[in-house]
């Protein structure tokens, strides 16, 4: 009787071991699949980061170009009093190419030619450095 109980226990243990090995195999397969998916997503993230850096560079070039154009208009209209540039500036404003800020920069001698993001950063610096209180 003890031998039959032992054999039955051994059979149950072996059956449980096979079941556990199968579960481990399934988990290993799932982990492998997740690692492949993670690797693919890492590649996509790296590609997007590269594209983001490229777009940042292009944006900086465009900001520099915009700054030089606005400086040129500002100089020609405000200092050189060139009416042709005033006409072009007004036409660009009427056609929606210049917004209110661009139009004011081009035509107002008191305005400096800056990029709006820089204006916000400068205002934040002034607020943070305010020692009056």
Image: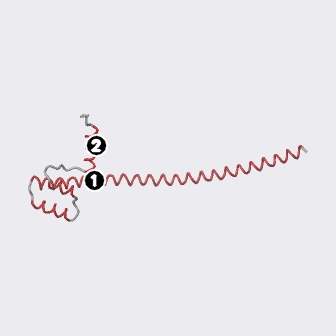
The 10 Å Cα crowd at callout 1, few under 14, some 14 to 19, many 20 or more, is few
The C terminus - image quarter: top left
Q: Position of residue 65 (x, y in %)?
A: 23, 55
Mark 2, residue position = 124
Q: Position of residue 10 (x, y in %)?
A: 81, 46
List the single residue furthest toward the front. 133
Q: Position of residue 55 (x, y in %)?
A: 34, 55
At x 19%, y 62%, the residue is 93
Q: Position of residue 62 (x, y in %)?
A: 27, 55
Report helix, strand or loop for mark 1: helix
Marks 2 and 1 sit apart, C-alpha to C-alpha, by 25 Å
Residue sitting nearer the eye, 96 or 49: 96
Task: Please give left or right for residue 5 compared with residue 24 in the image.
Answer: right
Report helix, strand or loop for mark 2: helix
The N terminus - image quarter: top right
Q: Which circle, 2 or 1, is nearer the viewer? A: 2
Could you say which quadrant of the image residue 72 lies in? Answer: bottom left
Vertical side of 124 occupied by 77: above or below: below
Mark earlier in primary sequence (2, 1): 1
Vertical side of 96 occupied by 70: above or below: above
Residue 116: give its label.
none
List the single residue furthest toward the right. 1
At x 85%, y 47%, the residue is 7
Mark 1, residue position = 61
At x 10%, y 52%, the residue is 79
At x 53%, y 54%, the residue is 37
């Amino acid at each position: 009787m003890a031998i039959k109980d032992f054999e039955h226990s051994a059979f149950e243990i072996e059956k449980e071991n096979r079941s556990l090995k199968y579960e481990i195999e399934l988990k290993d397969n799932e982990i492998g699949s997740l690692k492949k998916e993670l690797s693919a997503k890492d590649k996509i993230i790296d590609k997007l980061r590269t594209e983001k850096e490229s777009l940042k560079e292009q944006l900086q070039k465009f900001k520099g170009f915009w700054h030089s154009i606005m400086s040129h208009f500002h100089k020609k209209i405000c200092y050189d009093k060139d009416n042709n540039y005033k006409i072009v500036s007004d036409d660009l404003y009427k056609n929606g190419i210049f917004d209110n800020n661009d139009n004011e920069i081009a035509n107002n001698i008191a305005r400096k030619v800056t990029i709006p993001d820089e204006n916000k950063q400068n205002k934040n610096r002034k607020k943070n450095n305010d020692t009056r209180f």
